[in-house]
Image (spheres, rainbow, N blue to C red):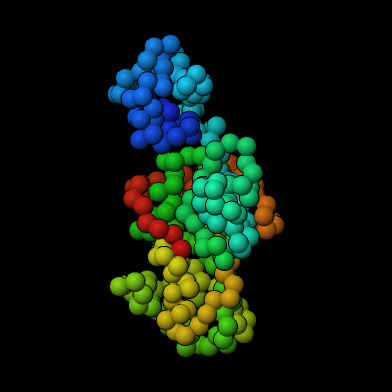
């Protein structure tokens, strides 16, 4: 099956489609030794180079794509910008290009997924798909029954009211919360509305992928079973982006 040249290059992780178009326009891209043109279609036998560097094709079955679970320590920033001190890419030190799926605030910690597969990113992030994210939270005041009830029922933030969710006390100052939304800094804003300050926030689970067994600062590849479950859960998901917590 033929693939547009800019997608072929971006799928390899070399750059974005827009950046690929710029490289093509500048004459930096060759197909089978000849200068490429915008809109060129690439087949299995074609050889693509950018400034002389061979662009390897991506396997259609995604067997060469990377899917990682990482236990992010507090203080690491979820950005691919290598100029940012403490960026997540340098922190992991993975040998090939990857990028985070969503984000965790710099002070937050816990599970974040990273991948080289751009097709899966927005499907996971799309809030309407109701994919669960499980957080453990510690606050600066005693967690009361009233607090638990209000957090679970919905809090008015960011010109909306948060969806009803599952909230369970885990200690005098702690609680677990399971969200199916991805509003910006949602848990911190919900707590602030009720007069509480978050002192620690840890994401324990995304969908069926758990933090169990991954020490802070460590990562692991997703298992075949986890990938099968994820692809099944994402069937029918559209690629509409919604920022994560």
Is 32 placed left or right of 212 in the picture? Answer: left
1, above or below 187, in the image: above
Q: x, y (%) of residue 58? A: 48, 28
Residue 236 location (% of width, % of height): 35, 46
- Residue 166 visible in the current orientation: no
The percent coordinates of residue 116 (x first, y second) are 51, 39
On screen, residue 31 versus residue 201, left or right, reads left
Q: Depth check: give the residue in front, 130 or 135.
A: 135
Seen as rendered, the residue at the extreme top is 33
Quadrant assignment, res 157:
bottom left
Picture quarter containing residue 127? bottom left
- 161 vs 23: above or below: below
Front residue (pair 198, 151):
198
At 44% across and 69% down in the image, what residue appears?
186
Question: Percent from the top left, x then y, of residue 14?
Answer: 48, 32
Whether residue 83 is visible here, answered yes or no, is: yes
Relative to residue 96, is residue 153 depicted above or below? below
Q: Residue at x 41, y 36 (%)?
A: 16
């Amino acid at each position: 099956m033929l693939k547009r040249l800019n997608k072929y290059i971006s799928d390899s992780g070399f750059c974005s489609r827009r950046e690929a178009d710029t490289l093509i326009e500048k004459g930096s891209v060759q197909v089978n030794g000849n200068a490429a043109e915008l809109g060129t279609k690439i087949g299995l036998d074609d050889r693509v180079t950018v400034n002389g560097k061979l662009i390897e094709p991506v396997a259609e079955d995604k067997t060469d794509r990377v899917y990682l679970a990482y236990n992010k320590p507090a203080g690491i920033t979820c950005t691919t910008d290598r100029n940012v001190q403490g960026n997540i890419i340098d922190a992991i030190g993975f040998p090939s290009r990857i990028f985070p799926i969503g984000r965790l605030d710099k002070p937050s910690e816990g599970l974040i997924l990273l991948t080289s597969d751009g097709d899966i990113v927005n499907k996971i992030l799309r809030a309407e798909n109701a994919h669960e994210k499980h957080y453990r939270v510690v606050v600066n005041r005693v967690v009361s029954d009233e607090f638990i009830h209000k957090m679970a029922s919905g809090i008015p933030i960011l010109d909306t009211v948060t969806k009803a969710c599952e909230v369970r006390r885990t200690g005098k100052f702690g609680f677990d919360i399971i969200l199916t939304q991805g509003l910006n800094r949602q848990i911190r804003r919900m707590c602030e509305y009720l007069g509480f300050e978050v002192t620690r926030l840890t994401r324990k689970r995304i969908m069926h992928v758990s933090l169990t067994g991954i020490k802070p600062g460590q990562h692991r590849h997703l298992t075949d079973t986890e990938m099968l479950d994820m692809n099944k859960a994402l069937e029918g998901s559209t690629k509409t982006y919604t920022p994560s917590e």
